[in-house]
Image (spheres, rainbow, N blue to C red):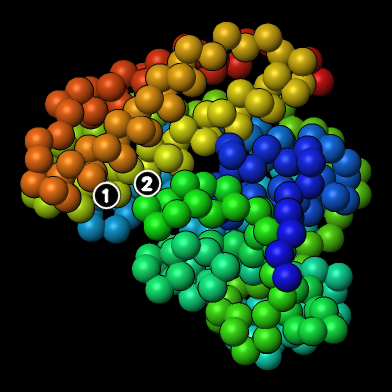
């Protein structure tokens, strides 16, 4: 069984794979637009990542915990290394379970059997098995991933690195926008000097995807609050950079030269974030 999963209000194209299913629950429980609060904090604080390269991708459980607080939800009954049997028991106790697992083991995604990454999904108990819902929306190297709802035998579910129920937090107040951008020099330098150019480009493709969606989400939240934010051209620049990084990766995989402007443009956009997204006025 398949069907469109995303709530009409959820802007799936500006959310990452951990945020997107949290966004569904936020809007369903609190009304249209609540999910945009996931973009309240725009940060550029790289941490050590795969292949000795820095990354802006936070650990999934930390990412969920912070995102849930921003939209007024709280993770409850957190289980680690939850196999299908435990997911079923959780889903029979709660209306829906939020889980994160390896995309390689998710039969509803183009990544299945092809690529490993931490990815979220929702699961509920259905009379025919596990009802999986995933609002992820992205073009991948193996075809499009689109929002949907599927029913699988419980044993086909991947083992979740963690799973939880999410409950509302009383007294919610919309978070104020925040901006925190570190100096990008060492981040860009790490990608420029990494000895494995293909590994660096593959990682950079993922990084620019995350960076671009985060900036679109932050701008959407500021506009949702009523702020006039002059960021349209800057966001177009981030969109172009994401496309350039993907093309550069594909060219490198074929042994062809890559655009020399990629990393200088990344540094320029990160530097410009401070001015474009400076928090000057906020209407609560």
Crowding at dot 2, Cα within 10 Å, few <14 / some 14-19 / many 20+, comes out as: some
Q: Which residue is mark 2?
A: 206
| Circles 1, 2 touching at the beta carbon (< 8 Å) | yes
Image quadrant assignment for residue 89: bottom right
Is residue 145 visible in this depiction of the protein?
A: yes
| 153 versus 266 height, above or below | below
The front one of 64 and 137 is 137
Q: Position of residue 159 (x, y in %)?
A: 56, 81
Describe the element under mark 1 as helix, strand or loop. helix
The front one of 272 and 201 is 201
Numbered mark located on residue 12 in the image: none
Seen at 52% across and 64% down, the residue is: 109
Q: Which residue is mark 1?
A: 202
Seen at 85% across and 50% down, the residue is: 28
Q: Position of residue 195 (x, y in %)?
A: 9, 49
Q: Position of residue 13 (x, y in %)?
A: 59, 39
Image quadrant assignment for residue 1: bottom right
Seen at 60% across and 80% down, the residue is: 157
Describe the element under mark 2 as helix, strand or loop. helix
The front one of 95 and 67 is 95
């Amino acid at each position: 069984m398949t069907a469109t999963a995303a709530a009409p209000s959820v802007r799936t194209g500006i959310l990452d794979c951990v945020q997107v299913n949290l966004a569904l629950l936020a809007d369903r429980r609190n009304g249209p637009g609540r999910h945009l609060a996931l973009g309240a904090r725009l940060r550029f604080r790289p941490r050590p990542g795969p292949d000795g390269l820095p990354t802006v991708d936070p650990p999934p459980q930390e990412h969920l915990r912070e995102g849930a607080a921003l939209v007024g939800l709280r993770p409850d009954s957190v289980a680690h290394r939850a196999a299908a049997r435990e997911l079923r028991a959780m889903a029979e106790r709660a209306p829906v379970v939020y889980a994160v697992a390896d995309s390689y083991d998710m039969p509803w995604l183009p990544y299945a059997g092809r690529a490993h990454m931490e990815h979220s999904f929702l699961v509920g108990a259905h009379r025919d098995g596990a009802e999986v819902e995933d609002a992820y929306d992205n073009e991948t190297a193996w075809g499009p991933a689109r929002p949907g709802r599927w029913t699988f035998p419980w044993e086909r579910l991947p083992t979740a690195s963690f799973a939880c129920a999410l409950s509302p937090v009383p007294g919610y107040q919309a978070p104020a926008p925040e901006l925190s951008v570190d100096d990008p020099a060492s981040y860009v330098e790490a990608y420029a000097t990494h000895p494995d150019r293909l590994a660096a480009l593959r990682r950079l493709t993922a990084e620019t995807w995350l960076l671009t969606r985060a900036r679109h989400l932050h701008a959407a939240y500021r506009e949702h609050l009523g702020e006039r934010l002059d960021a349209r051209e800057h966001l177009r620049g981030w969109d172009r950079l994401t496309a350039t990084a993907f093309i550069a990766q594909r060219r490198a995989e074929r042994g062809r030269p890559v655009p020399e402007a990629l990393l200088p443009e990344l540094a320029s956009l990160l530097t410009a974030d401070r001015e474009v997204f400076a928090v000057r006025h906020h209407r609560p």
